Image (cartoon, grey):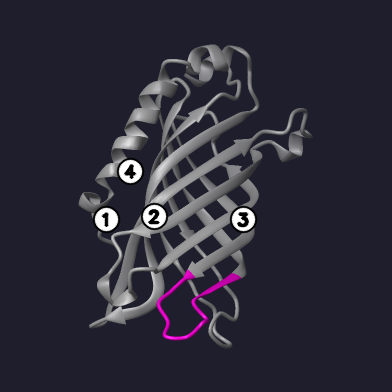
Amino acid sequence: MRFRLTSCLPLAIVVAFVSCCHAQTIYSARERNLPFAIGAGLSDFNVDFGEIHGNPKTMEGITLWLDYAPPKLPRALNGFDLEIEGRDINYGRPASLGSSFRQETGVGGLIYSFRRYSVIHPYAKALIGMGSIDFASSGSYRSDSRVVYAPAGGLELRAFKGIKLRADYEYQFWPHLFGPNALNPRGITLATEFDFRPRPASAY
């Protein structure tokens, strides 16, 4: 999948600026042992809306999320957190899709992290929420919304203390959109996460 960074340069500048601002305050926040992590990244998605000469139509967007670690979970649930995620796919739009095409999702659910205290660890997510799509049409039917199911997974790399880099892949199911078939947008997100959750000193 080709990631067209040129069309996402303004978003990259915003994410970099936010990263610098958060890096200056992450230590004091972690000292208070806040039970969550926040992240932002750039996404490159196959929007699953037609093809150009057999090539998938891809667009870019921005993704934000928050992971919450419920306190005092039973030992058997170690590694589970709750996640809410919002994504706006609205950049690098192919001309054939029209000027109004856009996909937005807001989902939430469970995330399970493997090897939680290692420098690199994989994770898996099961998310559900709502999706909204805008598209070009000659009639009044120009947008729709659906319940969205979004299994996902990826890798996190601890870059420095509570700052992590994340590579995420998500495959979405929008059931019965435009008939009996499901719409299946899918793609990657490259992101930075700021983790304020307490970790043992040995984890660093």
**Horizontal and vertical percent for residue 84?**
61, 46
Q: Kindly identify the residue that appears in the image at 63 percent across and 22 percent down.
A: 34
Instruction: Tell me, yes or no, whether the two marked residues, 1 and 3, touch with CB atoms within 8 Å.
Output: no
Q: Is residue 59 above or below residue 195?
A: below
Q: Amino acid at mark 4?
A: Leu
Q: How many marks?
A: 4
Compare residues 32 and 86 and report the one nearer the observer: 86
Tell me if residue 133 is in the magenta stretch.
no
Earlier-in-chain disc, 1 versus 2 = 1
Q: Secondary structure at mark 1?
A: loop
Mark 3 burial class by Cα count in 10 Å: few <14, some 14-19, many 20+: some
What stretch of residues is rendered in magenta?
134-145
3D distance between C-alphas at marks 3 and 4? 27 Å
Instruction: Tell me, yes or no, whether the two marked residues, 3 and 4, touch with CB atoms within 8 Å.
Output: no
Q: Secondary structure at mark 2?
A: strand
Q: Amino acid at mark 3?
A: Ala
Q: Which mark is residue 3?
A: 1
Instruction: Tell me, yes or no, whether the two marked residues, 1 and 2, touch with CB atoms within 8 Å.
Output: yes
Q: Kindly identify the residue that appears in the image at 58 percent across and 52 percent down.
A: 125
Q: Which residue has dot 4 on it?
A: 11
Q: Kindly identify the residue that appears in the image at 56 percent across and 17 percent down.
A: 30
Q: Nearer the viewer, mark 1 or mark 3?
A: 1
Mark 2 burial class by Cα count in 10 Å: few <14, some 14-19, many 20+: many
Q: Which residue has dot 3 on it?
A: 126
Q: Is residue 40 above or below residue 110?
A: above
Q: Which residue has dot 2 on it?
A: 188
**Horizontal and vertical percent for residue 17?**
34, 29
